[in-house]
Image (spheres, rainbow, N blue to C red):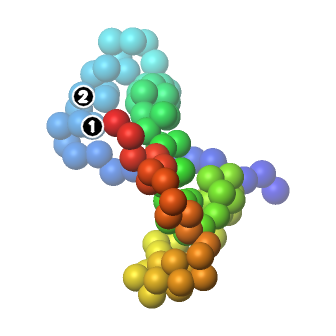
Amino acid sequence: MAEDNRLRIGLGEIYRDLLRNDAFQRGSTETQQADSLLGAKLMEREKRIMQRNQYLAWKRGITSAQLWMDVLTGGAKPITSEELAELRSKGLIDETGDVPGLDS
């Protein structure tokens, strides 16, 4: 059975109206236009998303790739203060240099 890749989002009335008009003006459907707009915005934010992933992985004492896959598979969750303290006490977080992923 194929995976359902649809994403449902709720837009406020003004944004729904803007999307509907934008799609009409471009000769596409609302779904196509929403897909195009979301893709463009994610491309614009890609570097920052990757930097934040690097920071969050560092904070957990794992690689960026491990966190990325945990997010994709649904295994990632916010870290608690207790978990952070335990990781630090075990020396699993490299605290010798700059905090990764926080450069502007």
Estimate the x, y position of residue 54 in percent, counting from the top left. 54, 51
Element on which disc 1 rests: helix
Residue tagged by mark 2? 18
Q: Mark 2 Cα within 10 Å, few/some/many (few <14, many 20+)?
A: few
Look at the picture and state if 45 lies above or below 74. above
Residue 31, compared with residue 82, is above or below; it is above
Q: Residue at x 40, y 82 (%)?
A: 81
Front one among 19 and 45:
45
Residue pictured at 52% horizontal, 42% vertical: 50
The residue sitting at 24% across, 28% down in the picture is 18
State whether residue 31 appears in this view: no
Q: Which mark is residue 90?
A: none
Is residue 102 at least partly visible in the picture? yes
Q: Would you say the residues marked 2 and 1 are in contact, meaning their CB atoms lie under 8 Å apart?
A: yes
Q: Give the amino acid type for the residue marked by disc 2 in the picture.
A: Leu
Q: Check disc 1 and report the residue beneath it.
A: 16
The kind of secondary structure element at disc 2 is: helix
Looking at the rendered structure, the kind of residue marked 1 is: Arg
Q: Which of 101 and 29 is in front in this view?
A: 101
**Horizontal and vertical percent position of residue 56:** 49, 59
